[in-house]
Image (cartoon, rainbow, N blue to C red):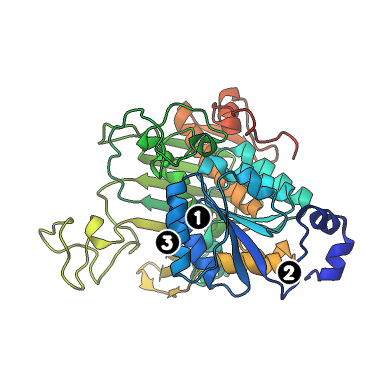
């Protein structure tokens, strides 16, 4: 049921939010949003919010003044009035004129910024994965509930009309009782090489970039984007591109937390600074009212085959003979690798007694039915995760969120469990109610803070 402006003000949560943010939004009110982290995905946030009616990009925040200048110039070209600018996210959270924040900072900041936003009476769009470790995600969920905020997770498949249609087919028995889902993250990732410790570049506020993470000296590889491949700040590709497919694999299978997790892999081919695996094979077992189900997940980083038509561009699954993947392809020619523009095999496959269904990235799906694998239903549809978030900010109805933070936390926990299993080198037995690994202190320590701890002043709170 939609909560109107008057009724929301009567609730204790509504009064608290009013006192904290100074703003209570009605259905027709303008949403004043701040985007945090502007370099890559954050620029996508800016471009998307700019297109949503009734949204004002009121503030931007980034620790790199060079990126900030570029984005302000970009916004000016887009016809956006100059927003307030912040270097320190803590000062942004004090701005009572901001209704909501959109967080596109590195992974190690996601939960803390989300918690701070809730405590400041602001709604939050939190990019994937919502946490750098299990404990952070649990605390973010607690903060969302305590402060009654709207918190959307950045797994946009949940707002894709194509993916929603595909999941509907699964729920209504198109391929029968699904026993297995597979998440595929086969994305070309070249070596990052090695980079020495050096001086922090001019205009970069590196202490604020580090936030919760330890200072091991500035290197180019530990900074823009390549931070994904270090345990202090990232979660490898399973927590980068892979979290999308993990979330969709779990969604389609209709499960929550697993009972058993096993992962094996390594860092192959390249001799460089990367710490996280570039090849990872994971298996998750679920026990519940609907019986035993399995989820498999794979990360591959270089040359590989496509599966179930996922990632195929053109009429053939195979590239032309002698194709040079670094050359510009002929018009209409199917390609593999960097030359294709979309070289990866990114998506999900579901298996049941009546057939197979595959989803490619966020929007497209196909199915094959019967023992002859005859083509079944298929389709494509756009995703509107940001629009769904803004609608819920206005209505104050968190139940209408397509990607609520609690679902994001569950999927992110699967990512963390796989990484921990890989790091400790053994199968984990997980208790879905306590959200703890049974009889494994080392694994639980890694789930809690990555065995890295928090820098003073940037701790994720024990009590939100």
Q: Answer above or below: position of 462 versus 164.
A: above
Q: Residue 107's x, y, as percent?
A: 52, 43
- Image quadrant where one finds the N terminus: bottom right
In the picture, the quarter occupied by the C terminus is top right
Rounded to the nearest whole Å, what is the CA distance between mark 1 and mark 2?
A: 29 Å
- Give the mark nearer the N terminus: 2 vs 3: 3
Q: Earlier in the sequence, mark 1 or mark 2?
A: 1
Residue at 85% over, 57% down: 15
Q: Assign a secondary structure to mark 3.
A: loop
One can see residue 353 in this view: no
Kindly give the residue lying farthest to the right in the view shown: 10
Closer to viewer: mark 1 or mark 3: 3
- Count of all numbered marks drawn on residues in the image: 3
The residue indicated by pointer 2 is 395
Q: Which residue is mark 3?
A: 361
Labelled disc at residue 249 = 1
Pinpoint residue 290: horizontal percent, then vertical percent.
63, 54
In this picture, residue 168 sits left or right of residue 237: right
Residue nearest the viewer, comparing 174 with 36: 36
Residue farthest toward the left in the current orientation of the protein: 322
Judge depth for marks 1 and 2 and give the one in front: 2
Residue 393 sits above or below residue 304 on the image? below
Q: Residue at x 89, y 63 (%)?
A: 10
Q: Are marks 1 and 2 in contact (CB under 8 Å)?
A: no
Q: Residues within 10 Å of mark 2 (few under 14, many from 20)?
A: many
Q: Which mark is residue 298?
A: none
Q: Could you tell me residue 60's position as x and y percent? A: 56, 55
Quadrant assignment, res 369: bottom left
Q: CA distance from mark 1 to mark 3?
A: 11 Å
């Amino acid at each position: 049921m939609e909560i109107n402006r008057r009724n929301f003000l009567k609730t204790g949560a509504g009064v608290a939010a009013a006192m904290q943010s100074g703003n209570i939004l009605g259905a027709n009110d303008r949403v004043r949003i701040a985007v945090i982290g502007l370099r890559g995905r954050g620029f996508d946030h800016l471009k998307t919010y700019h297109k949503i009616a009734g949204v004002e990009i009121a503030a931007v925040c980034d620790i790199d003044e060079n990126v900030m200048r570029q984005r302000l110039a970009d916004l000016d070209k887009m016809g956006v009035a100059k927003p307030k600018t912040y270097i320190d996210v803590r000062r942004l959270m004090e701005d009572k004129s901001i209704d909501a924040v959109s967080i596109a900072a590195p992974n190690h900041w996601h939960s803390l910024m989300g918690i701070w936003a809730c405590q400041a009476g602001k709604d939050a769009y939190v990019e994937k994965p919502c946490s750098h470790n299990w404990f952070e995600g649990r605390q973010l969920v607690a903060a969302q509930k305590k402060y009654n905020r709207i918190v959307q997770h950045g797994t946009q498949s949940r707002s894709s009309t194509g993916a929603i249609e595909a999941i509907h087919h699964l729920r209504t028995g198109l391929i029968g009782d699904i026993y297995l889902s597979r998440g595929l993250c086969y994305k070309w990732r070249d070596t990052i090489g090695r980079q020495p410790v050096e001086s922090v570049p001019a205009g970069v506020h590196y202490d604020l970039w580090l936030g919760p993470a330890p200072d091991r000296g500035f290197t180019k590889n530990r900074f823009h984007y390549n931070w994904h491949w270090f345990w202090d700040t990232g979660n490898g590709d399973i927590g980068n591109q892979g979290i999308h497919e993990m979330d969709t694999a779990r969604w389609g299978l209709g499960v929550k937390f697993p009972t058993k997790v096993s992962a094996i892999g390594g860092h192959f081919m390249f001799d460089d600074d990367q710490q996280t695996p570039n090849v990872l094979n994971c298996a998750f077992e679920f026990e519940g009212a609907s019986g035993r189900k399995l989820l498999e997940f794979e990360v591959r980083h270089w040359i590989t085959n496509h599966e179930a038509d996922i990632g195929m561009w053109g009429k053939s699954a195979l590239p032309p003979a002698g194709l040079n993947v670094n050359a510009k392809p002929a018009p209409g020619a199917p390609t593999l690798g960097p030359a294709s523009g979309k070289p990866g095999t990114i998506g999900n496959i579901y298996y049941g007694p009546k057939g197979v269904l595959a989803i490619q990235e966020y929007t497209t799906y196909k199915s094959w039915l019967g023992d002859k694998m005859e083509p079944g239903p298929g389709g494509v549809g756009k995703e509107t995760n940001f629009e769904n978030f803004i609608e819920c900010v206005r209505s104050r109805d968190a139940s209408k969120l397509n990607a609520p933070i609690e679902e994001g936390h569950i999927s992110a926990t699967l990512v963390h469990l796989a990484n921990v299993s890989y790091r400790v080198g053994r199968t984990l037995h997980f208790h879905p109610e306590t959200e703890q690994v049974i009889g494994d202190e080392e694994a639980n320590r890694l789930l809690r803070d990555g065995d890295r701890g928090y820098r003073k002043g940037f701790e994720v709170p024990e009590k939100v």
